Image (spheres, helix red, strand yellow):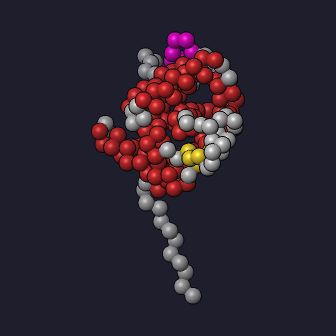
């Protein structure tokens, strides 16, 4: 009996699968953080795949625009910002019934997706860092403003890149590599140890 040929992945498929996995994990984070707000909501798998595919298209365009040959050179805050537009455009968070109260589920998912990507370098302390960041009023104010911004400008990936960059400088400075004189990465002013 002839064997079935192994499925080979195209160069973009591992990145597509990684973004889908991150999106599913971010959804779990959002559901844990806001169980009452997302009661009656679910993540549409078809729209998740479309969102990840749109991200890949934007990712490729970004690489071409900035002449980036090695995709691993793209900083985490830029990945976070590039993914917000496809999430807000495709709206993978759907309401299953009339009990769904959230009209900001997709924007919140986009923000928490960005947090998950920005905190990727902090494994395995990621959960501990999220708790310390998300527990403060300053973060809740920031999140509220970011949601308001995404409601008005859902396709603003470039602006979200800068928003996540600023967020990382404040909360996760080791994600941002700062230039230095002696080859040692310096900590930014106002560095907060988490």
Tell whether position 175 is magenta: no
Q: Is residue 127 above or below residue 132?
A: below
Tell whether position 187 is magenta: yes
Which is nearer the eye, 35 or 181? Answer: 35
* Residue 136, x across and y down, in percent: 66, 19
Residue stretch rendered in magenta on the structure: 184-191
- Which residue is located at x 42 percent, y 26 percent? 162
Q: Quadrant of the N terminus?
A: bottom right
Total number of numbered discs in the rendering: 0
- Which residue is located at x 51 percent, y 29 percent? 147
In this view, the residue farthest toward the bottom is: 1
Which is nearer the eye, 144 or 167? Answer: 144
The part of the image, by quadrant, that contains residue 2 is: bottom right
* Residue 184, x across and y down, in percent: 50, 21
Q: Is residue 47 above or below residue 149?
A: below
Which is nearer the eye, 58 or 89? Answer: 89
Residue 134 in sight here: yes
- Which residue is located at x 35 percent, y 40 percent? 62
Q: Is residue 193 above or below residue 160?
A: above
* Residue 116, x across and y down, in percent: 58, 36
* Residue 51, x across and y down, in percent: 47, 48
């Amino acid at each position: 009996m002839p064997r079935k040929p192994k499925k080979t992945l195209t160069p973009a498929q591992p990145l597509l699968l990684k973004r889908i996995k991150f999106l599913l994990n971010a959804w779990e984070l959002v559901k844990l953080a806001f169980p009452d707000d997302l009661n009656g909501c679910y993540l549409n798998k078809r729209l998740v795949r479309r969102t990840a595919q749109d991200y890949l298209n934007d990712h490729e365009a970004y690489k071409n625009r900035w002449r980036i040959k090695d995709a691993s050179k793209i900083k985490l805050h830029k990945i976070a910002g590039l993914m917000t537009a496809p999430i807000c455009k495709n709206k993978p968070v759907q309401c299953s019934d009339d009990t769904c109260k959230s009209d900001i589920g997709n924007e919140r998912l986009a923000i928490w997706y960005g947090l998950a990507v920005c905190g990727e370098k902090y494994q395995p302390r990621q959960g501990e860092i999220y708790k310390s960041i998300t527990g403060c009023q300053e973060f809740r104010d920031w999140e509220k403003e970011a949601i308001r911004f995404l409601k008005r400008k859902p396709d603003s990936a470039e602006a979200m890149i800068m928003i996540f960059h600023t967020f990382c400088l404040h909360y996760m400075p080791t994600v941002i590599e700062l230039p230095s004189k002696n080859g040692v990465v310096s900590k930014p002013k106002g560095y907060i140890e988490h």
